[in-house]
Amino acid sequence: MKRLLPLLLLSLAVAMLAALLTGSSDLSLRAALVALVRGPWRTGVETGIVWQVRAPRVVVVALVGAALSASGAAFQALFRNPMADPSLLGIASGGSFAAVFVLFHLPWAPVWVLPVATFLGCFAVALLLVALSRAGGRPNMTATLLTGVILGSLFTSCTSLALLLSDEYQLRQLVFWLSGGAEARSWTHVALAAPPIAVGIAVLLSVSRWLDALSLGDDHAQAVGVPLDRARNVVLVGTALAVGGAVGVCGPVGFVGLVVPHLCRPFAGSSSRVLIPVSAIAGAALLLLADLLSRAFLPAGIQLGVLTSLLGVPFFLHLLVRERRAQG
Amino acid sequence: MRIEWKDLTVSVKGREILSRVSGSLEGGRLEAVIGPNGAGKSTLLKVLAGHAPKANGTVFLDGREIRGWEAPERACRLAYLPQFRPVSAALSVWDLVSMGRLSHLGLWRPPGPQDRLAVEQAMDRLGIGHLAGRDASTLSGGELQRAFLARCLAQGSPVLLLDEPLTGLDIGHQLSLLAILEGLAREGRSVLWSVHDLRLAAEHSGEAWLLDQGKLTARGPTAQVLVSPEARTAFGVAIERSPSGDWRFSKATPTSA
């Protein structure tokens, strides 16, 4: 951890810097750097581009990457399931549906309603998932995954229904939002997303000892003194806060929570105390990288969520095969 | 510390897995739970550990109903080794054993010298000190078993409920574990363990509880329980002890009784 942390922070800083210095406007690297160094309080086009257009986007992407990765690591411990990921298990779909509901029915609502709604949507699905996957016996990996996927598709269908019922202008807006992206994010978005994400990650980190015990099974966790129901609820609240914050500002960005903790585990181990912060930092850096890639190589308008899914699906299949092989 | 249970009954789908089992265990005792497969040994230990919310009957730990204890308070008094010992996560052995200190530390307090000492002593006692830095998912079955036992010891609880602690250990480690259990009882702790190897039970456990189809059919000094007609019925095996002290087990011919 002590050796890993500076390296991780350095790569996050490099990723942030790279994202700040590149973009669609033809601002030279030098001019961008000058504007960056001079700070946000200057006037001028360069300052505006770097500090009002790029910087909030960079912060939003980093926050979302951190939130999704940290909650993925926590979910994998809670469900003792290497495939558990809040997006894959329908949690993010619940948040998206709540967001679409708000955008569709309450367009007049103040901005803070959106993150609150996405949190509630995520939390509701998380509770449903736990209740359903435990109904009728011990939850196992397959049952949990199936339940989550089913819940996810239920809420995706609800979202599609909302899309079908919307007029053309709303439709464009919703589809854009639903494909998961960080275009045109402002400091307002940062202000909306940062508090729930920070609190969510802090909550998950604070119960990392419980998560470690839970990763060995309910019996062992209870035997060493983990209050099972309380622990589960705290993890669900923390996850819903982090994922809800991310979904509220960026739409559903899939597979980050699955991929990042897996990449980190070989270096950081499985102990949540280390894995959650490492995943959060690495996730922020990696999502920034993905955002850079999508802007550099994909046609304009292709959203971040599309890219993470394109990369994430083969990764998921690889994990699935590996797990099956490990189980013999 | 005393643990006492009364009229424990557990039913699953209309079938009684445990029916009206009562008893108690005092400090300083090492007692074995024996019985054929499916007799209810694991269920009994699970209920005594407070892990079966749907059990009927009462369990009193240190004078208070088991479900009345907060989870960490209970864990400080009672260490339970479940039978199923999975390792999906790549935790280090040190982290695994350190989990025994969770109930003492709570969520945030960093481990102090006495916590580290408890973990080190537990690992040394079970002979896994050299494995501290190893990834637990790379251990052999027997090493993992000892790591989980070390977790129980590190917990420092006066009552220990161990579900088949000998499974997966070679004979050498079985004997050293039994010596550890006897040592724990001498220190004044209460140890209840379930076991399939009746020979080892006879040689190392003063007293035994015999479960048969969920009922407690015999209890007393292990040697007496083993030669009782109840044991013969339970196992379907004739158990004899030769004058030289050797145990003989032979498939019993069905009796009309």
Image (cartoon, rainbow, N blue to C red):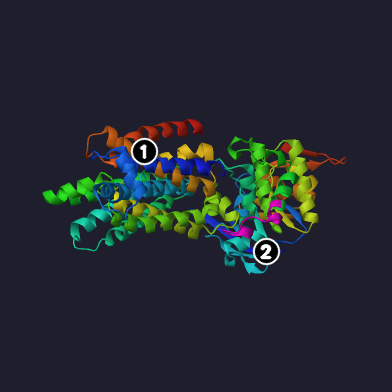
* Residue A264 falls left or right of residue B101: left
Q: Residues within 10 Å of mark 1 (few under 14, many from 20)?
A: many
Say which residue appears at 48% left-offset and 42% top-offset: A8
* Residue type of the residue flagged with mark 1: Leu
In this picture, is B251 found above or below B14? above
Say which residue appears at 42% left-offset and 45% top-offset: A69
Q: Position of residue B17 (x, y in %)?
A: 57, 53
Q: Chain of mark 2?
A: B
Question: In terms of image quadrants, where is residue B133?
Answer: top right
Q: Secondary structure at mark 2?
A: strand
Q: Chain of mark 1?
A: A
Mark 1 or 2: in front is 1
Q: Nearer the viewer, residue A27 or B250?
A: A27
**Residue B205 in view in this figure:** no
Q: Residue furthest right?
A: B244
* Residue A156 falls left or right of residue B196: left
Q: Which residues are magenta?
A: B103-116
Q: Residues within 10 Å of mark 2 (few under 14, many from 20)?
A: some
Task: Report which residue position mark 2 lands on.
Answer: B4
Q: Position of residue A20 (x, y in %)?
A: 33, 43
Task: Report which residue position mark 1 lands on.
Answer: A289
Q: Is residue A309 magenta?
A: no
Q: Secondary structure at mark 1?
A: helix
Q: Position of residue A309 (x, y in %)?
A: 32, 38
* Residue type of the residue flagged with mark 2: Glu
Q: Nearer the viewer, residue A30 or A295?
A: A30
